[in-house]
Amino acid sequence: MTELTELGVAQIRDGVAGGDFTAVEVAQAFNANVAAAQEALNAFIIATPEKAIEAAQATDAKRARGEALGKMGGVPIGMKDLFATFDVQTTAASHMLEGFKPQYESTVSQKLWDAGAGMLGKLNLDQFAMGSSNETSYFGNVISPWKRNDGGNAALAPGGSSGGSSSALAARLCPAATGTDTGGSIRQPAAFTGTTGIKPTYGRCSRWGVVAFASSLDQAGPMARSVQDCAIMLEAMAGFDAKDSTSLDLPVPNWEAALSGDMKGKKVGIPKEYRVDGLDEDVSKSWDDGIAWLKDAGAEIVEISLPHTKYALPTYYIIAPAEASSNLARYDGVRYGLRDLPDGANLQDMYAATRAAGFGPEVKRRILIGTYVLSAGFYDAYYTQAQKVRALIAQDFAKAFEQCDVILAPTAPSAAFGLGENVDDPLKMYLNDVFAVPASLAGLPAMSVPAGLNREGLPLGLQVIGKAFDEQGVLNAGLALEQRAQFSAKPEKWW
Amino acid sequence: MSVDTATVAKIASLARIKVSEAEIEAMVPELNGILAWVEQLGEVDTSQVEPMTAVIPNTLRLRDDVIDADPLTGGDKRDAVLANAPAAEHGFFGVPKVIE
């Protein structure tokens, strides 16, 4: 029999339901992998093996009683440590929230537990989800299980901010994990690790209980190793929540049941502005492969134009820090989290000392940028202008979708880079999200599926962007790619 | 537009983050690099464009005007609210003395 830790969400769900193995056996197998990889990969901030076993026992007991097991029945998952989990430390990978034990459960995590999933642990991430390489976590870098095929031993980035999620998936520490995507934080790490992830339409998944970064962009989504697994988990995560004022009051479609890789009659848009000068040769080739695969699936390929693409990243780096500076004002050392109270300090001193000690350099950088662009005299020139350009970017997509059903593009401009290679230059790091950010600014569903390996033996991802609310179209195009890419590479175990 | 050490000190103070002079010195070129890069947005003609307020059209809802309609966000949660406070005292958040 295949090792249990090689199985995905659907296989575990069906195997537990069919009695091929028990949920407890599955949880034990993944718990063992989590423990064995912790030192080398640092994918989890804390492991919660007892939670995984507890949920598995509940699933096995339900099965014994002949009850329905739920969409995720018996599936243990990793929970990005940005989701508040009741009485389990929730840190956003920051010193500020070290030791914070929420007295409530985020809507998305509660929905997953209600669907029969269990928690293997809280996954590491970039601090407050700010980063593209998982090098800003207070709890240390996450290491990708992948290595270049050059015989070297360079430690590679798993992408960010959902780097714990992507590393754990690629290393078979979990069959699925939650991610959050503000400007590519699900898709870019999925691309870097040969895994699959979808950011749904803004508002599909409740933000309640998710540590806020940039509220007009933040969106939770599933990460797994197949399109079908993402569809199943997204069904469990999505749905209206009265506690989130931007939650979409729409029924959750049965995405899994409607999956089809048949693209006949569908038009796929290829945005000419994404074919930038100096685009990595292997990335360019994998994009051409993707075009050929979707043609093979029956789709018609059309060239489209998204004229404001080059302004998406600078727009994002005004709006996201502006919202972050406002959201992170809550960390004041009074109500929860860290307090630094120097001798003789007054209240204002305490705020400033607490925030100096609790935030890492990238978080401080973004708070300062955000404070500056929102400050009197600069607000219109920066923030209002960025919100106007954002409207133009959204309009670009609306016009493009008059000509096509989905858009195909690379997920990231390169394969995974080495740890430390980009840390000295924030701008260079930001450019990693050049293909991911536009869909975030427009609130559109977008996913990354593995396309193949580059010449260094590292995975590359293809991105499908869809119309608002059309997760089905995105998943179906993703499935058509998956069926033809036949991606089966996995990192050789060294940890 | 670019920032100097005095401006960085000012925004750090507005953001309530204590920074040393050395940190300010290091931040000036970093922030200027980012600001110079985002300034390319100035070349976009937005004279006919309304700034975006909601990325997906949505209307703000009103909840029913009922006390404790949602028990989770209703009242009677003092201990839960204070559970993670660094200095909870007598059912309140403790802070340094504010009034002399």
Image (tube, coloured by chain):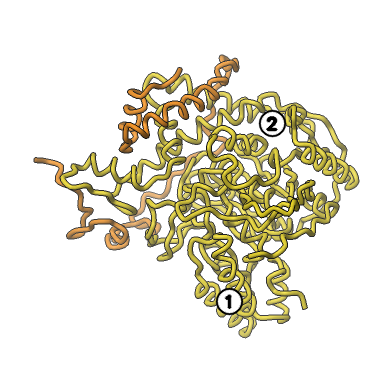
Chain colours: A yellow, B orange
In this rendering, would B43 be left or right of A138?
A: right
- Within 10 angstroms of label 2, few (less than 14), some, or many (20 or more) residues? some
Tell me the residue that label 1 is attached to: A56
Q: Tell me if I can see residue A243 in this picture.
A: no
Q: Using the image as rendered, state which of residue A339 and residue A493 is in the foreground.
A: A493
Q: Secondary structure at mark 2?
A: helix
Q: Nearer the viewer, mark 2 or mark 1?
A: 1
Q: Secondary structure at mark 1?
A: helix
Contact? badges 2 and 1 (CB < 8 Å): no
In this rendering, would A493 be left or right of B22?
A: right
Q: Quadrant of residue B80?
A: bottom left
Please count the marks in the image.
Answer: 2
State which chain disc 2 sits on.
Answer: A
Tell me the residue that label 2 is attached to: A398
- Within 10 angstroms of label 1, few (less than 14), some, or many (20 or more) residues? many
Q: Amino acid at mark 2?
A: Ala
